[in-house]
Image (spheres, coloured by chain):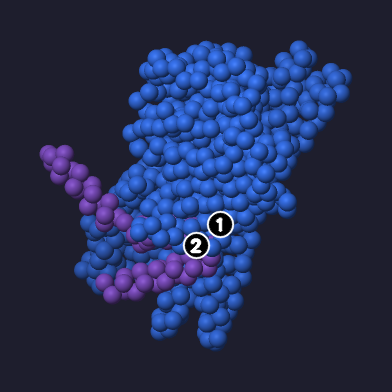
Amino acid sequence: MPSNQSTAELMRQLAEESKTDADEITNELIDIAMSLKHRSDSTTSRRDLMEKTLNQFLINKDKT
Amino acid sequence: MSKSELWFKRIEVENWRQFLGKHSIDFSNDKSKHLTIIHAENSVGKTTMLNAIKFVLYGVTPEFTDKKNLVCDRSNKDTCRVRLNFKYGETEYTALRVYDQNGANSKLTMHEIKRQGDQKLVPSADAIINKIMPSELSNYFLFAGERYQKALDGYDNNSHHRAIRDILGFTLSETVIEDINVLKSKYTKKLSQLLKKNKETNNLGKELERLEGFETQYKKLIEESDRELKKQIKIKETNDELIKNSNHIKAKEFAKTQELQEKELGRTKDNRTGTLKQRQKLISSYGYILFGSKLTKKNFDHIKVNRGDIPSPHRENVITKLIKQKKCICSTPILPNSKEEKALQELMQEASNEIIDNRVIDAISQGDYFKKRSVSFLNDLKNIESNLLKFNNQIGSLETDLEQLDKDIKAIGNVNISKFQEKRDAAAKEILKVSGDIAVYKSDRESNNNLIKTIKRQISQVQVSSSENTKLQKFIDLSDQVIDKLTKTLKLHEKASLKEIKELVQNNVTQSLRKTREVILTEDYQFELRDPETGRIDKGSDGGNGQTLLSNLSFITALLSISKRRASDRQTGSIFVPGTISPFVIDAPFAEMDDTYIAKVLEFLPKQSHQLIIFLSSKQWEDEYENVIGESIGKRYIFINHDMTIDPSESSLTIKNKTYQLNVKTDDNKTSATTIEEI
């Protein structure tokens, strides 16, 4: 029977493996929205940055 | 410090109302002693100071009757100033608003304070302040107790809903969903244009654009219908409550029965829907059994009866007979060892070899299984059909009863009650219609999305060679995944948050109120207190102003408590970022509460707040409260009233056995009417 620790590790690994692209990128997008929340010109710059981030994510993914 | 935490550091007023010259308060920024308490007599400046905070941030003074006379009379000046220093996350700001009495206008300037003490002008200060703490949130966190003895339901529903969602950290995720939707539309348009340029994909591009257009329309329609549904539900509930709380005994009885029967009708309809789904599932999973059973009965039953027959045109018995009689049915002789007899023998072997035998056995046993299973399938189906019939009868009878109740209520002849009943009827009809519309939109949207997926699949099959198309498609797919994840997570967490707020408020209410009250929280974050015995809901100040104020304070601290936890959750990867964890500034928090309620509120307020600033009437302070909140107090001030006529001995305050005079007799009118002293 696996120990609690190894079960936890297994669960963590499983969770890590079952991560989707959306899981990986969503937190980054939230951080962008949060960091630009208090800028008056934020809508355009926020969307620009999100677009760049999504494209960069796809490029990195293609490389791996 | 969390990125979302807002701390008020210092307020400084100059010639502001009764404060002649400069006066300031440094608020406690110590996390373990986060309470700043300001004691004062009534009409000495507590509300004035709360309004100073509202004024510097938003340029408003909602609690002043005279909104234009802001400059201290004794100053002989035309302007007054309020400065607020605050810290948001790691950034420190100083905001200054100057009011000019001549033009009755004010101007805000704000600077970011750099580490070396340098100041950098912040452009669009109003916009920044409103993003840090939207003005609608100020209703909650800059709380005038005397004004808000009434329930918080006085606020406009939409701004209330928006404000609460911001506090809980949902609006940021919604911003991301909105942004990604905009980007997705941009990329879909780009992709359609590219596809249209290519002969092979021209039609697919057009079709994709058309379907994406439908998707936007469905989304909008569903959102609009959802809003309409909520509105109609509220109208119906309000009118139901009006009838239930009316003085007419018969109407009350009818309305209660109506409510119970409607609930029963809802439950029965849900049961019917569940049973219909069950039937559909049963038929789609086992319907083939019935077909299989009929098919095998027709083709294989004879095999069982007449074992030895083979499932082919060459019946074993016929062939054996032909060999025995040495003559075929066409009169050709079949002589022993002749090529005819050999052919028949081979045919026999071929037709009854082991493989064929096994196949026959399999087919027979499959037929048996079909037969048995079809019996239980038919029984299950029969039970389901009988339940459906039962539910349909119940629905019919409940609907008839409800129609009668509707007539009975209207027949009472009371104009108001008939009016309420008509309004709730109209709303009920609208609810039915809109719910149906939503179901249709959702189903159409699903079909449309399936078509989009098919088109996308087709596009990916023909566009492999075009890297630009693939890039655009990947971006759109990723956008879909992000939107889907955020939407699902939001829905799940909103439900959990409602439950959590309700539990926190219920806990405070149970521990603090003398009466037993059940907390009801709607999806719009409106809360009510219900008497569990009578079912009656306390509206406005029904339960007493003290009760309303206590539950309102409890509601706000519950929100703050959840926001605080959300901020730490964020560090472990949660997508929910609380809008702002704001200081909670309360003027006269205990306006009409008795000593027991005050002690209870003092217990939960500091525990569930972030930075707490209380302007407290000296009459409501008892030295014994020190035992309840003393450990949380980081800074403490008194407002001293300077008056030419007053007897100084008239008002004093005892804190930790030490007495402070709150009135000072002044000989001239050139000193400030109120001064502030830290104790």
Q: Locate residue A14, reporting x and y percent.
A: 25, 51
What chain does mark 1 sit on? B
Residue at image position (75%, 18%) is B246
- Reply above or below: B174 against B54: below
Q: Locate residue B536, reporting x and y percent.
A: 64, 18
Q: Which residue is mark 1?
A: B109
Q: Could you tell whether B82 is left or right of B558 in the image?
A: right
Q: Residues within 10 Å of mark 2 (few under 14, many from 20)?
A: few
- Chain A visual colour: purple
Which chain has been coloured blue in this picture? B
The amino acid type, in three-letter code, at marker 2 is Leu
Query: Split into 4 quadrants, where in the image is the C terminus of chain B?
Result: top left
User: Could you say whether the residue bearing mark 1 is in a helix, strand or loop?
Assistant: strand
What chain does mark 2 sit on? B
Residue at image position (60%, 16%) is B647
Residue at image position (37%, 28%) is B632
The front one of B513 and B19 is: B19
Q: Are marks 1 and 2 in contact (CB under 8 Å)?
A: yes
Distance between mark 1 and mark 2 Cα atoms: 8 Å
Residue B42 can be seen, yes or no:
yes
The front one of A33 and B42 is: B42
Q: Which residue is mark 2?
A: B121
Q: Could you tell whether B220 is left or right of B626 in the image?
A: right
Picture quadrant where residue B67 is located: top right
The front one of B375 and B635 is: B635
Q: Could you tell whether B279 is left or right of B633 in the image?
A: right
Q: Are marks 1 and 2 on the same chain?
A: yes
Q: Could you tell whether B518 is left or right of B26 in the image?
A: right
The front one of B544 and A5 is: B544
